[in-house]
Image (cartoon, rainbow, N blue to C red):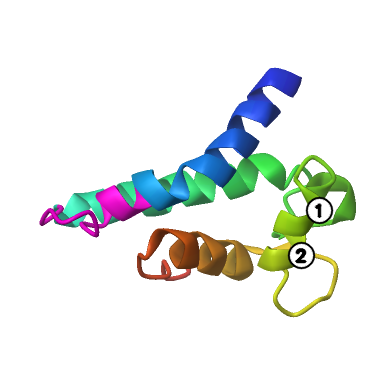
Amino acid sequence: MKIRTFAIIGALVAAPPTVFAQANGNDGTAGSAGDGDRAQSYTRLLFSDLDKNRDGQIDKIEGAKLEPSLVKKMDTNADGKVSQAEFDQYQAATSGSKVPSSK
């Protein structure tokens, strides 16, 4: 379980500037319509893996596995929790892609 968590955290920190930008066509290529959907699905998967109690928030306990400065950057309303919307906004900002719509 720890290995999976560290792999996801590594993907969260390292992948957005490359993976998300490429999936959304921001790497100088056209990108296909389905690529943005894949990036959004990947973001949702990362969030759901961190949100262990499935309340739609990454709280302090769940966020303890992340770098504290990263959680602070994502928590834009400073309530001590990272919502799906804040998580999506962070991913979009670090990748140069559009913020996924809530579904």
**Residue sitting nearer the eye, 54 or 92:** 92
Q: Which mark is residue 68?
A: 1
Identify residue type, mark 2.
Lys
Tell me if residue 1 can be seen.
Answer: no
* Amino acid type at image mark 1: Pro
Spot occupied by residue 67 in the image (x, y as percentages of width and height): 76, 47
Res. 3 visible in picture: yes
Do the numbered discs 2 and 1 sit on residues whose CB atoms are within 8 Å?
yes
Residue at position x 75%, y 22% in the image: 2
Residue 80, image quadrant: bottom right
Residue 53 point in image, percent of width and height = 79, 46
Q: Which residues are magenta?
A: 20-31
Q: For this view, does 103 lie left or right of residue 86?
A: left
Left or right: 50 in relation to 93: right
Q: Position of residue 61 (x, y in %)?
A: 89, 48
Q: Which residue is mark 2?
A: 72
Q: Are there few (<14), some (14-19), or many (20+) residues within 10 Å of tag 1?
A: few
- Name the residue rendered at 41%, 59% in the picture: 95
- Provide residue 48's location: percent of width, then percent of height: 62, 46
